Amino acid sequence: MSLFSVFLNTLYAAMQLFTGAIGVYQIVLSLFGVWYRRKPLRHPPQKRFAVIIPAHNEEQVIGPLVDSLMAQEYPRDLYDVHVIADNCTDHTREVALKHGAAVHVRNSEDKRGKGYAIEWMLERLWKSGVRYDAIVMFDADNLVAPDFLRIMNDRLCDGHKVIQGYLGVKNPFDTWVSVSMAISYWYSNRMWQNARQNLGLSCSLGGTGLCIDMALLREMGWGATGLTEDLEFGVRCVERGIYPIWAHDAKVYDEKPTTLMASMRQRLRWMQGHFHCAGRHMIPLIKAGFAERNLAKLDAGIYLFQPMRFLILFLTSLMMLLQISTPQTTWMSHVTSLLPTSFWVVVNVVLYLQMPLALFLERVNWRAYVGLIILPFFLWTWGPVVLQAYFTKSNRKWAHTVHKRAIRLDQLRSR
């Protein structure tokens, strides 16, 4: 056997072992996501919130979001809604004012993006002298369930510092792309986030529906100005031994892209930020996880190594395809026979069956099950996205996602 063949055998063997380990790891952890029971509210309203909404040319969607915040089942004197009209060239400012929000106009040619806007707004809040116990962040296209602030108040009173709300989708059935994204989120919410909450591990932050204790923010500073500011801040919390928790009942609804190209552009930005963050924090977290025997830090480091939620099916199905299609008489037989075909079949089937299980547990509309038919194709589109992101990970230019669906909360409930 040539040296080149030995190298390829070793490389593919390592890929098989690593991919198989990740698949089994996720299957085992996901089992803990099956169990869920709504946690009763035990504390009266007492925390004061600063609600922050970065908005760049969001005149189409900002009104319904502010309306859903004004309708919170929480004392109106205990929260303020601050909209950042960030480099806007439309009527975002006027629409937000009309619906009752305080609007802060920001113009910056060099520091563009959500992370910079949040950092700028926090400085304004700290200089204002107004006392807030916590901040809550939303994207401009969101809708917020009426009990969201009540739930965040309860978790803060229990002593938690960083809380991530449930990430729902407000337009799941617009196109095959939006329903595929919605299925991914329903699966992630139940079998990823809820599972880690049940195990006492850190949940991952989603960039919206996020609540942070103000004293912690003052101590740490924001410092998250990359393409994935949520991931950056969450990783820094885990490094400090502060584990963000998951609030399954605190629901936020997000608008997802309806075309494949728009979805791939959005996911490319996510993955570029993911690779950048991994380059800085992955190795220290994994080392700390082993040194301290800390599963939460090790799990966070594994998450940074690659976005497992979307790539596990892609990688394991690729391994299964190689295993099935490679003739046993070629040099590749040494590679594909490392783990038997039955192993890859079982891993892929179990991982995929977790999708309909998550839909069933989350009690979603029956139309979502139809989307399972085309979901494998959508999952495979993560392959070229991640590959491109790896080679363009140095890109720090923020790209705006256009939002158009001005859906109100009452319309969402009737869908």
Image: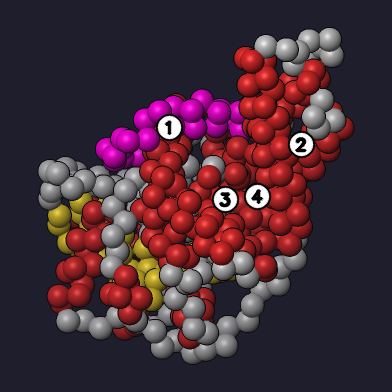
Amino acid at pointer 3: Ile
Task: Give the farthest residue toward the right.
Answer: 342
Residue carrying label 3:
302
Of the residues tagged 1 and 4, which is closer to the observer? 1
Instruction: From the image, state whether disc 3 or disc 2 is nearer to you.
Output: 3
Give the CA separation, mark 2 to mark 1: 25 Å
Local secondary structure at mark 1: helix
Q: Above or below — where is 156 with respect to 262?
A: below
Neighbour class for label 3 at 10 Å: few (<14), some, many (≥20)? some
Residue nearest the observer in this picture, 86 or 23: 23
Q: Residue 46, how many percent across, how many down?
A: 41, 88
Are dots 4 and 2 in contact, CB under 8 Å?
no
- Name the residue tied to disc 4: 187
The three-letter code of the residue at mark 1 reads Ala
Of marks 1 and 3, which one's residue comes earlier in the chain? Answer: 3
> Could you tell me residue 284's position as x and y percent?
46, 56
Asked if 100 appears above or below 60 in the picture, the reply is below
Q: Amino acid at mark 2?
A: Asn
Q: Is residue 410 visible?
A: no
Name the residue beneath numbered marker 2.
348
Does the image show residue 335? yes
Q: Indicate the secondary structure of the residue bearing disc 2.
A: helix
- In this view, the residue in front, 297 or 264, is 297
